[in-house]
Image (cartoon, grey):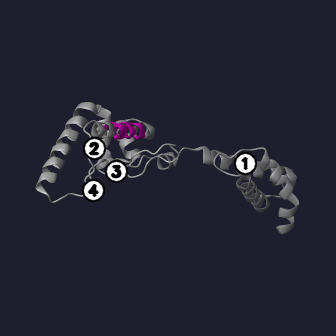
């Protein structure tokens, strides 16, 4: 097996260099090609009329293409593009406040602070009730229930990206509302 791998390693590198794997490196494709070579060794039958080299080429190419197609599927896209209320978007370039930073912190026992917090909460709920679209309201309610983007998208009959966009709009509207009211962070 080692001799076959050494003999065909250059061939596998050559095959892998003609493809591109999004989010991967050339070494990943070479490794996939070597897996294809292993499968060729395992599955090659002498009684067929194909040479080992042509069979190996077919197996290596198919394994590399399968790896590229698997990586291109959007199976994990919702997990990779979610919106966190406790972290700003990665790579957004600018310092963006998180929803957790924008909303009030720990409850305070001071009656005056509690009254102000209650009034702020009422104002925020009124703002959300009047500025959020039906989709944004529904998405926010389901998100706060702990549902995943996929579940929300399925219930709403839309894509997870639409859910992501709706939550981004909610976040901006809450931030704008609180800036307009000039809420002071009492933490």
User: Which of the numbered marks, if any, corresponds to residue 81?
Assistant: none
Kindly state the secondary structure of the residue where label 3 is placed: helix
Is residue 168 rendered magenta in the image? yes
Q: Which is more toward the observer, 86 or 141?
A: 86
Say whether residue 25 is left or right of residue 56: left
Q: Residue at x 83, y 68 (%)?
A: 2
The residue carrying mark 4 is 187
Say whether residue 45 is left or right of residue 183: right
The residue carrying mark 2 is 141
Answer few, some or many: residues within 10 Å of disc 1's Cα (few below 14, many 20 plus, some between 14 and 19): some
Kindly state the secondary structure of the residue where label 2 is placed: helix
Going from the N terminus, do you reach mark 2 or mark 1 first? 1
The residue carrying mark 1 is 62
Residues in magenta, as a range? 164-173
Answer few, some or many: residues within 10 Å of disc 2's Cα (few below 14, many 20 plus, some between 14 and 19): few
Q: Position of residue 108 (x, y in %)?
A: 19, 58
Quadrant for the N terminus, please. Answer: bottom right
Distance from disc 3 to disc 2, alpha carbons, whole Å, reads 20 Å
């Amino acid at each position: 097996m080692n001799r076959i791998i050494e003999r065909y390693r250059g061939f596998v590198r050559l095959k892998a260099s003609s493809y591109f794997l999004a989010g991967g490196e050339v070494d990943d494709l070479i490794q996939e090609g070597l897996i294809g070579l292993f499968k060729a060794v395992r599955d090659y039958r002498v009684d067929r009329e194909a040479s080992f080299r042509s069979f190996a080429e077919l197996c290596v190419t198919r394994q590399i293409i399968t790896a590229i197609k698997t990586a291109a599927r959007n199976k994990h896209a919702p997990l990779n593009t979610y919106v966190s209320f406790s972290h700003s978007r990665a790579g957004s370039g600018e310092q963006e406040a998180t929803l957790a930073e924008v909303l009030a912190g720990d409850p305070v026992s001071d009656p005056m602070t509690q009254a102000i917090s209650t009034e702020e909460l009422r104002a925020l709920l009124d703002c959300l009730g009047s500025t959020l679209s039906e989709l944004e309201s529904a998405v926010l309610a389901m998100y706060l229930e702990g549902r995943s983007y996929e579940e929300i998208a399925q219930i709403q009959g839309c894509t997870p990206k639409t859910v992501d966009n709706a939550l981004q709009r909610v976040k901006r509207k809450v931030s704008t509302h609180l800036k307009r009211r000039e809420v002071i962070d009492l933490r």
